[in-house]
Image (spheres, rainbow, N blue to C red):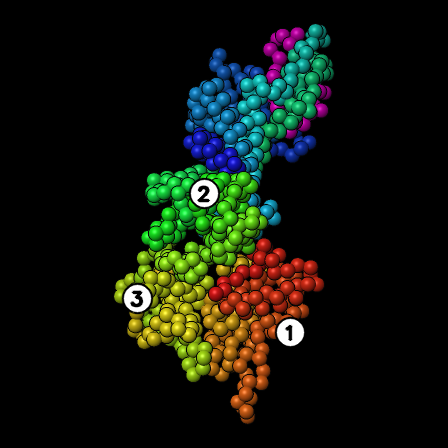
Amino acid sequence: MLRKLHGLPSLAVMLFVITLACTGAVLSLMPTFHRAAAMIPAVGEVSVATLAQHVVTHFPQAERIERDLSGEVIVHYQLDEKSHADLVNPLTGESIAPYQPSAVMVWLKDLHRSFLLGDTGRIMAGVTAGFMVLICLSGTFLLVRRIGGWKALVRPFKGKGGKRIHSELARFAVLGLLLSSLTGAYMSALRFGVFTDHTYVEAEFPNAVSGGRPASVSSLIALKNIDLSELRELTFPAPNDRQDVYSLTTRHGAGFVDQSTGQWLSFEPLPESGAFQQWVTKLHTGEGLWWLGLILGASALTMPVLSYTGARSWWIRRRSAITQTNSQTNKVSFEQADTIILVGSEGNITWGFARDLQANLCKAGCRVYCAEMNQLEDYYPQAKRLFILTSTYGNGDAPSSAHNFLTKLGSFRPDQTLQFAVLGFGDQQFSQFCQYALDVDAALQNKGIARLHSVGLINRGSSAQFREWGNDIADVTGIPLALTHNPLPTPTAKLTLIDREDYGLEGLAATSIFRFSATGKDSLPFFEAGDLLGIVPPGDDVARFYSLASSTSDGVLEICVRKQPHGVCSGYLHGLIIGGGIEGFIRQNPEFRPALGSNPVILIGAGAGIGPLAGFIRKNTQRNPMFLYWGGRNEEADFLYQPDLGRYLEDHRLTGLQTAFSQVKSQATDQITEKTYVQDKLLQDQTAVRQMLEQGAQILVCGGRDMAAGVAQAINDILKPLQINVDSLKAQGRYLEDVY
């Protein structure tokens, strides 16, 4: 519902919003230009009486003095029976230049206020501003829900592409856009009488005046007591008419002054509601608050990009939904089906996996019905198996095609023979990895339905993990499944091996550092240390991913790979000779990066997990505090990057190094005498580690899952005196993992 409140109004008023935003951005510059051009006397330096005297000296036929919100003083006068207006120096009353508003700016104001359509356009502009309030509020709540709470608004965002751009710009601009839209909607309501306008007050015209000889304007006590900064407008009495008066408007009210005695004849103060309404105008236009105008203008400039990225995301979801609907391959109704597949998807990527599962099941002779999770029926009369494939939206929420599922589950009547299996899709870099799938799995179990298989979790659309899950389901059900869906088929590039360093070849943990260059005249793609190199070994259709230890600027593509027992891809790589070639592609991994700034960075890894960590150290040319804790097997045979780390310590790109080796042997007996792991080194240094974390340090962990689990436990122990834990650091973006 919230997404509809945000998306549908945005699409409906997109062109109007972009028009208001672009014109508003240009108009927002005017207060700054006017302020820069205006001469602003200090408070108390010039009174209204002094200014008026200077003006009549230079403009004997002056009729009116006006001071705008930017501080510019304009005198209106008659000359040769024609009306004129000049900008004047408030200190001397001399003319600076003729006052002529720009025709272009007048046109832009009309376009901004009414779309050049008069009162009809003003109503449209007001309605658009009202929609913008709704869009800003709903968008803010959507963003907070997606990133995991209000506190996350001040932390680095995760993700990439159009959604990341949309979220970053929205975070930057939402306050300015909300202020502009709220004030614009309120001003429109004032214009058309929804609220009573109290911004202008009129004093009662005096019944009697002194009628004495007019005094010099500089001597009028009422005008002498008002500072120029308070002035809005002063109208002179008609020449030779002793019954006429000075009409004076200040920011506190309006009244009339006797031209002979200089006393107030009447005065009407501006009510508090009027002062509030004037402030609304200033907050909307920036007039008198030039710095606010620049902020509002910068916010407005984001609207075209926000509109494009938002509309593009909507269209991708819509097009994918249409494609899924049009490509519906159900050959049986849900009443006839023995197998039900329900899909929860935000961007419809999950549908590709569901179609692959459906095709395999149909090929095996099953009667399969596939639909959205929102289309859960109350009863499936012949169904024996229920598969739920779902992604997670934001902070553990349901994706768009599943937001009604748990509600509808309340009226679901499962057959006693029905069994279910849930498969979740997500990204392990996010704290709520596959959380909605876990919630659905628990809800189905609480419903009393038997599990066919424990919940499966797929990271980053891994086709290999999907295939393994299919094999598990095949083992349980006896239905042959060969799941092969790859949601991101990526064009590969040819890479040539130009160098390799081998470690531990005599032991059980042979590990090599491979360095590749582009083949022929091709150039390397853009990548950073911590990104992933995807390699598809010959005769296989599943890519394996290796963390990169280099950046494009290094001129080589470097990975560190341990040879796994029976490992297809690692065996293939270890069999390469210099000059050999591979096919590979880059997958960006921006969620695994050291944070910018001077806070300490603690790098923790084991084995080949040192690769990206060494790359981070290599790029630390600012010499920010960076500490490495790394574990290997044997110091003599397995100390990866030892020469490089020595250089980094010497030139201070690396601040401190602690190593742990789990296979330290006695020279006399050749028996293992010591087993030290990286978490042991962390606990030995716990005081220093805790102090760094108190200073805002960030932790990056790379390596195997068992090592990562041990490290997390050690860090939790270290953090106990601070009453925080690893989960807290993860929520702050200060604990990142790249584990396998």
The reply to whether residue 196 is visible in this rendering is yes
Q: Position of residue 237 (x, y in %)?
A: 62, 13
Amino acid marked by disc 3:
Gly
Amino acid marked by disc 1:
Gln
Mark 3 and mark 2 lie on one chain; the one further toward the N terminus is 2
Q: Is residue 225 above or below residue 736?
A: above
Rendered residue at 37%/73% (across/down): 571
Q: Nearer the viewer, mark 3 or mark 2?
A: 2
Under circle 1, the secondary element is: helix
Rendered residue at 46%/22% (across/down): 121
Residue for badge 1: 684
Q: Position of residue 460 (x, y in %)?
A: 44, 56
Residue for badge 2: 381
Rendered residue at 52%/53% (across/down): 450
> Does 231 lie within the magenta span?
yes
Under circle 2, the secondary element is: loop
State the extent of the magenta-drawn residues as a range: 221-244
Task: Look at the numbered discs 1 and 3 and tell me whether their residues touch, using CB distance below 8 Å.
Answer: no
Furthest residue toward left: 520
Q: Position of residue 254 (x, y in %)?
A: 66, 18
Mark 3 to mark 2: distance in Å?
Answer: 44 Å
Counting other residues with Cα less than 10 Å from the Cα at mark 2, is it few (<14), some (14-19), or many (20 or more)?
Answer: some
Counting other residues with Cα less than 10 Å from the Cα at mark 1, is it few (<14), some (14-19), or many (20 or more)?
Answer: few
Rendered residue at 54%/83% (across/down): 664
**255, 44: nearer the viewer:** 255
Mark 2 and mark 1 lie on one chain; the one further toward the N terminus is 2
Residue for badge 3: 539
